[in-house]
Amino acid sequence: MAINQQSAQPLSAQIEDDLRRRITSGEVQVGEKLPSLRSLAEDYGVAELTVHVAVKKLQHEGVLTSVSGRGTFVNAKPVDTADGEASELQAIRDELRELRLRVEAVEQAQSEAGR
């Protein structure tokens, strides 16, 4: 849980990356409760707000979920950004291919109707 105070990368981003790494590696399991923000802040040697920013980002990604009065839990393993972007790009390509085929079919129908 080493955080580099002199790094150009914001502390919250370093914590986010470390939590993501810990979840991906299995050090923290899906369904497991995270320590409190106060405890994580002490472990990382930062303010609670800094940890809160990192946790909120992971919540937004769907990796973590908070249950009022119970704590924050690991909801899912993080998606590898490269894999996620590659699959998203492939989905866009597939949709573009489908749209191209539809346009060609419409143009073909219009051409045949005009004859």
Image (cartoon, rainbow, N blue to C red):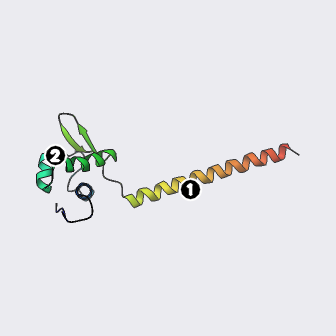
Residue lying farthest to the top in this orientation: 69
Residue lying farthest to the right in this orientation: 115
Report which quarter residue 16 is drawn in. bottom left
The disc labelled 1 sits on which kind of residue?
Answer: Arg
Near-viewer residue (29 or 4): 4
Mark 2 or mark 1: which is in front?
2
Report which quarter residue 84 is drawn in. bottom left
The disc labelled 2 sits on which kind of residue?
Answer: Leu
Could you tell whether 72 is left or right of 90 in the image? left
| Disc number for residue 37 | 2
Which element type, helix, strand or loop, lies under badge 2?
Answer: helix
The answer to whether residue 23 of the structure is visible from this angle is no
Tell me which residue sits at (41%, 59%) in the image: 83
- First in sequence, mark 2 or 1: give its number: 2
Tell me which residue sits at (52%, 53%) in the image: 91
Could you tell whether 20 is left or right of 114 in the image? left
Identify the residue position indicated by label 1 in the image. 93
Does residue 66 lie above or below 3 as drawn? Answer: above
Tell me which residue sits at (18%, 61%) in the image: 3
The answer to whether residue 103 of the structure is visible from this angle is yes
Q: Position of residue 68 (x, y in %)?
A: 21, 34
Could you tell whether 70 is left or right of 91 in the image? left
